[in-house]
Amino acid sequence: MNKINFPVDDFTKLYDNIYNYNTIKDDPNFEFVSRLLDTEANDVSLTFFSEDNISFLNTSIINEVLEISKNELGKAYRIQPQQREKMLTVMRYIYFAFVTNTYELNVEVQRLNDKFLQEVVPTAYNALVAYLKYLETYNRTNNEPMTNPISTQSDKVELRSPSSLFNF
């Protein structure tokens, strides 16, 4: 990462944040987050993987898909909450791909949440559209059973005896 793309202009603030980002050691999720990340949890990871944040992200996905479906499809569709395990998998990817631990705690977690929603909301909306198209196709068919197969063989060929092949 070159200096132009680095998220902090004032490097004194960078060191202040680095020294102050590991203060929540008594969090009940400390062991869970440490095992999930396979490294010691810090304030950013504990806040990002907290139950409140997971619930917030789930609600945000539902609301954003509702808004997009209202604008794009003309009808608002409310999707179900996403499975916790699947969300944790994507959150883990987002955490490792985009965490910098250089911003203040709330700014860093908000940035990770935004990246998560940018990744998940289009996928959830596309899955909704695919499901609606499936339902439309299913309801359009006549639901008639398939006919029995018809043999394509025009006439049966009789096998000759082996003696006729070898002139016995």
Image: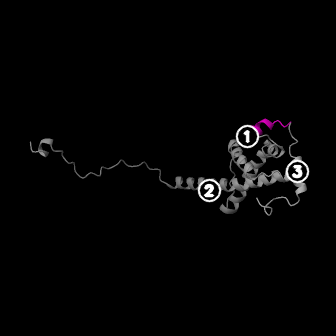
The earlier-in-sequence mark between 2 and 1 is 1
Q: Residues within 10 Å of mark 2 (few under 14, many from 20)?
A: some
Q: What kind of element bears circle 2? A: helix
Majority secondary structure of magenta residues: helix
Image quarter of the N terminus: bottom right
Residue 111 seen in the current view: yes
Location of residue 13 by image quarter:
bottom right
Closer-to-camera residue (21/142): 21
Residue 25: horizontal and vertical position, in percent?
86, 38
Which residue occupies the extreme bottom position in the image? 4
How far separated are the C-alphas under marks 2 and 1?
32 Å
Q: Could you tell me which residue is drawn at 78 percent across and 48 percent down? A: 56
- Which portion, as a residue range, is magenta? 26-37
How far separated are the C-alphas under marks 2 and 3?
43 Å
Residue 96: horizontal and vertical position, in percent?
73, 49
Task: Please state which amino acid type lies under the numbered disc 3.
Answer: Asn
Q: Are marks 2 and 3 in contact (CB under 8 Å)?
A: no
Q: Which residue is mark 3?
A: 17
Q: Which residue is mark 1?
A: 36
Q: Which residue is mark 2?
A: 129
Q: Residues within 10 Å of mark 1 (few under 14, many from 20)?
A: some
Image quarter of the C terminus: top left
Closer-to-camera residue (5/93): 5
